Image: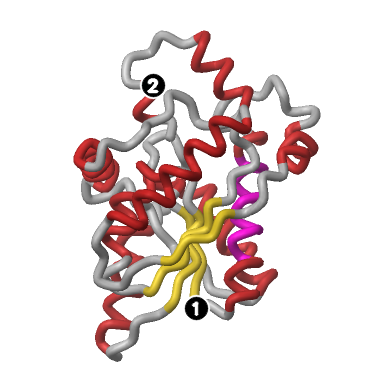
Amino acid sequence: MNKRNYHKELEQRIAHHVSLGEVPTLLLHSCCAPCSSYVLEYLSQYFKITVLYYNPNIYPEEEYRQRAKEQQRFIQEFPMKHQAEFIEGAYEKERFDQLAAGREHMPEGGSRCHACYEMRLREAAEHAVRLGLSYFTTTLSISPLKDADVLNEIGARLAEEYDVPYLYSDFKKKNGYLRSTQISKEYGMYRQDYCGCIYSMRERQRSSRPGYMNKSN
């Protein structure tokens, strides 16, 4: 079975709207400013974007606030063809704690992470419906440590549930991740050294793998 090329599907979807002279609206869930950088550079050429910063998994709250502030700063400073808007979601730490219960010792990238992806994508879908936007998607697939198949499967399932199209993507393709690191340096962004939750923070503290901090955004 051939593996789906989500980036090619995204390009085809964009080409369709361009051919019709359309600029659709998009709810973009963002995990952090560095990961959003290339995604906004690319998608803002073709979509009117509302960025949703909803990440109650992030620990501690001070870290959450710093990342949220950096996300907002980047959106304000970065020039876009169609300037993006920013929404900060609620910091519902108890919501993440509930889904993580019983999964505390799962490895990074396992079922705890998948449940966390769904929690954040569900919030994105709900915002897209509430705001009447054309699509929803997430920046998460830009990370080399995030499984695009899992993310797109969750997105497709929620799209059916909420009756709002999911924009398939794999933003790490075509050097997307590399470009995000370049933009991050250009804008002097704060770059976290762990994915976000207390479990990823503990794993980072135990890990000595080179490059871990740049790959786990």
Type of amino acid at the residue the image marks with label 1: Ser
Residue position marked by numbered label 2 in the rendering: 212
Please identify the quarter of the rendering in which residue 116 is found. Answer: top right
- Is 10 included in the stretch rendered in magenta? no
The kind of secondary structure element at disc 1 is: loop
Q: Magenta span: helix, strand or loop, mainly?
A: helix
Q: Residues within 10 Å of mark 1 (few under 14, many from 20)?
A: some
Mark seen at residue 134: 1
Type of amino acid at the residue the image marks with label 2: Tyr
Q: CA distance from mark 2 to mark 1?
A: 35 Å
Q: Nearer the viewer, residue 110 or 85?
A: 85
Q: Is 165 situated left or right of 104 in this image?
A: left
Quick one: quadrant of the C terminus?
A: top left
Please identify the quarter of the rendering in which residue 61 is found. Answer: top right
x and y, in percent, of residue 118 in the image? 64, 50
Q: Residues within 10 Å of mark 2 (few under 14, many from 20)?
A: some
Q: Which residues are magenta?
A: 114-125
User: Looking at the image, do the residues carrying marks 2 and 1 touch, with CB atoms under 8 Å apart?
Assistant: no
- Is 117 included in the stretch rendered in magenta? yes
Which residue is depicted at the point 25% across and 87% down? 19
Q: How is the image coloured?
A: secondary structure
* Residue 2 showing in the rendered view: no
Which residue is depicted at the point 66% across and 24% down? 106
Mark seen at residue 205: none
x and y, in percent, of residue 68 in the image? 50, 44
Q: Nearer the viewer, residue 14 or 73?
A: 73
